[in-house]
Amino acid sequence: MNIMTRGDIMAEGKGYGKCILFNEHFVVYNIPSIVSAIGDYTLATVEPTESGGVQLVDNRPATPGYKEDKLEHQKDSLRRILDAMDINQDENLKITLGGELYCASGVGASAASCTAMARALNEYFNKGFDDDRINDIAYEGEKGYHGNPSGVDNAASTYGGLIWFVRGENNIFEPISLNEPVEIVMGNTGKVANTKAAVAGVKERKEKEPERYGGLFEDARKLALDARKALEEQDIKKVGELMDLNHRLLQQIEVSDESLDMLVKTARDAGAVGAKMTGGGLGGYMVALTPGKELQDRVATAIEEKGFKVLRTKIGV
Ligand code: MEV
């Protein structure tokens, strides 16, 4: 007799990488931010096993040291995801992570994996959760990595597109439309960064210097409003100028570092209309706004010639 059991099922789910264009770190404190999903994604597959509980096989391409460094965070994150989905921690199943998203700090690799796993488990266990629920589960998973995530990364990873995101009692997500997608280059410093420590550092300095930080945070709020207007008006040159200013603010709250500043300068010198660090900082990725294939190639090549890896992608897809 041929009985259908869960043993016949294999399920999969995707989570997109992301690029924060404005206000990483500030977003943790309810200052508006602008984030875009990128085309590269992590793919999770779930399949049954005979025994051994939940196994996680991580085949994602990554910066050397990245996966080893994040292993404990990843285990904590998976436990939180299973809890949030009401799935027994002892289920016999194998989760495999793959896809082309090159994992490094700043590209939303943790959020992409949380979203991909939540989607694949949703499918496997037939939970019927919608995107809002998947986003909430991915947010729970992100806590394993960040401690106090704002939710911006998992929002981009789950919903895709270009998003105005404001953290709050009820987070605000508003899509921003571009007439056409715009090319960007993401340059990888190759340094594995610790977002949790970077976020904690900002908190500490903000508490020590409330007045100076208050002023910088106010500047970041105004900058986000200007950036949204510039994007809505498709004024890409202005968007680039505002990205440069945002990088300056991020330097002032001490989340950039020499390697990021150097790649930002390389991109600007090669003609990028704007460039800044992106994500948690202290290593990881930077982003350059490079409308048109030709400019994108020129900036990417300038970074590659310095011996760094790049990701050529687009925002507003
Ligand atoms: C990390 O990609 C973005 C941060 O703002 C942290 C967060 O929002 O959770 C640094």
Image (tube, helix red, strand yellow):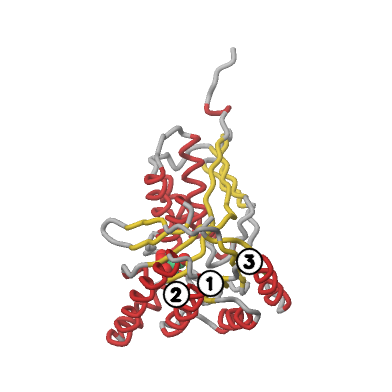
State the quadrant of the N terminus.
top right
Q: Is the shortest distance between ligand 1 and the CB of mark 3 under 8 Å?
A: no
Q: Count residues near mark 3 (Cα–Cα under 10 Å), then give few for <14, some for 14-19, many for 20+.
A: few
Q: Is the shortest distance between ligand 1 and the CB of mark 2 under 8 Å?
A: yes
Q: Count residues near mark 1 (Cα–Cα under 10 Å), then give few for <14, some for 14-19, many for 20+.
A: many
Query: Does label 2 or label 1 sit earlier along the sequence?
Result: 1
Place of residue 48 in the rendered image (x, y in percent of width and height, measured from the top left): 56, 34
Helix, strand or loop status at disc 3: loop
Can you identify the residue that label 2 sits on?
198
Residue at the top extreme, as displayed = 1
The circle drawn on residue 34 is none
Residue type at mark 1 is Ala
Q: CA distance from mark 2 to mark 3?
A: 33 Å
State the quadrant of the C terminus.
bottom right
Place of residue 38 in the rendered image (x, y in percent of width and height, measured from the top left): 55, 58
Helix, strand or loop status at disc 1: loop
Q: CA distance from mark 1 to mark 3?
A: 30 Å
Q: Is residue 157 left or right of residue 214?
A: right
Query: Does label 2 or label 3 sit earlier along the sequence?
Result: 2
Can you identify the residue that label 3 sits on?
292
